[in-house]
Image (cartoon, rainbow, N blue to C red):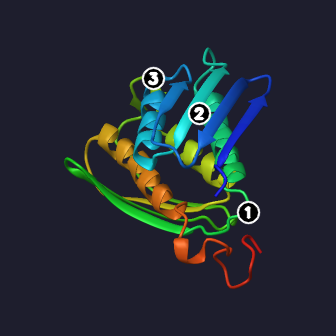
Amino acid sequence: MSQRTATRARQTKETKIEVAVNLDGTGDYEVSTGIGFLDHMLEQLSRHSLIDLKVAAEGDLHIDFHHTTEDTGIVIGEAVREALGDFKGLTRYGSATIPMDETCTRVSLDVSQRPYLIWKVAFTKPKLGDMDTELFKEWFQAFAQAAGITLHIENLYGENNHHIVESCFKGLARALREAIEIDPRKSDAVPSTKGVLGS
């Protein structure tokens, strides 16, 4: 099996982002977005999915964190999509239920090339550190759209906003790890009765 890697870049008047992924990695990461909390979440994504991840982002943080957050999701999603190649052998589906102290979050996904986000997550505070909590939905939406993933995220319960967000990223990581594994019994076939994904 060829190594499933990709690099993607995006530059606009608002952001400049470079991403590299190795889907068959060991969870090594180098992440720098200028947003400390987002860095922490992307490190969790890499470590728990075992996807090697490099992210170098510069953005208009003097305005707010919106553009950098959203565009980082886009470029990481694009890189994952490219690294998946022809989708042959994919397990395709993945799910995880992640407990974190008082919090529990469920994540289910389908690497379907039919992007969709269901987001049932609420926060009790407008910010975590300097980051607006409303931006986390924007990141997951951007990632799901660019990666072509149907993604359902539901926080079942929890009180601590940090735990809620972190359980969402860890849930994505574990579900993605499961979904992108190659099934040795069907390593030569696209996981769909149609023979293609996204139609």
Q: Is residue 26 left or right of residue 149?
A: left
The amino acid on which the numbered mark 3 sits, given as a three-letter code, is Gly
Towards the viewer: 199 or 92: 92
Density class for disc 2 (Cα within 10 Å; few <14, some 14-19, many ≥20) is: many
Callout 2: SS? helix
Q: What residue would you read off at disc 3?
A: 36
Q: Residue at horizontal 52%, vertical 63%?
A: 179
Estimate the x, y position of residue 189 in percent, counting from the top left.
67, 75
Q: Looking at the picture, does residue 165 appear above or below residue 194?
A: above
Q: What residue would you read off at disc 1?
A: 86
Image quadrant in which the C terminus is located: bottom right
Q: What residue would you read off at disc 2?
A: 69
Q: Sequence order check: which comes first, mark 2 or mark 3?
A: 3
Count of numbered marks: 3
Q: Is residue 96 left or right of residue 28?
A: left
The answer to the question of whether label 2 and label 3 lie on touching residues, with beta carbons closer than 8 A, is no
Q: Sequence order check: which comes first, mark 1 or mark 2?
A: 2
Q: CA separation, marks 1 and 2?
A: 28 Å
Q: Residue at horizontal 62%, vertical 24%?
A: 56
Q: Residue at horizontal 46%, vertical 53%?
A: 172
The amino acid on which the numbered mark 1 sits, given as a three-letter code, is Asp
Density class for disc 3 (Cα within 10 Å; few <14, some 14-19, many ≥20) is: few
Q: CA separation, marks 2 and 3?
A: 11 Å
Estimate the x, y position of residue 30 in percent, counting from the top left.
52, 26
The amino acid on which the numbered mark 2 sits, given as a three-letter code, is Thr
Image quadrant in which the N terminus is located: bottom right
Q: Residue at horizontal 68%, vertical 52%?
A: 81
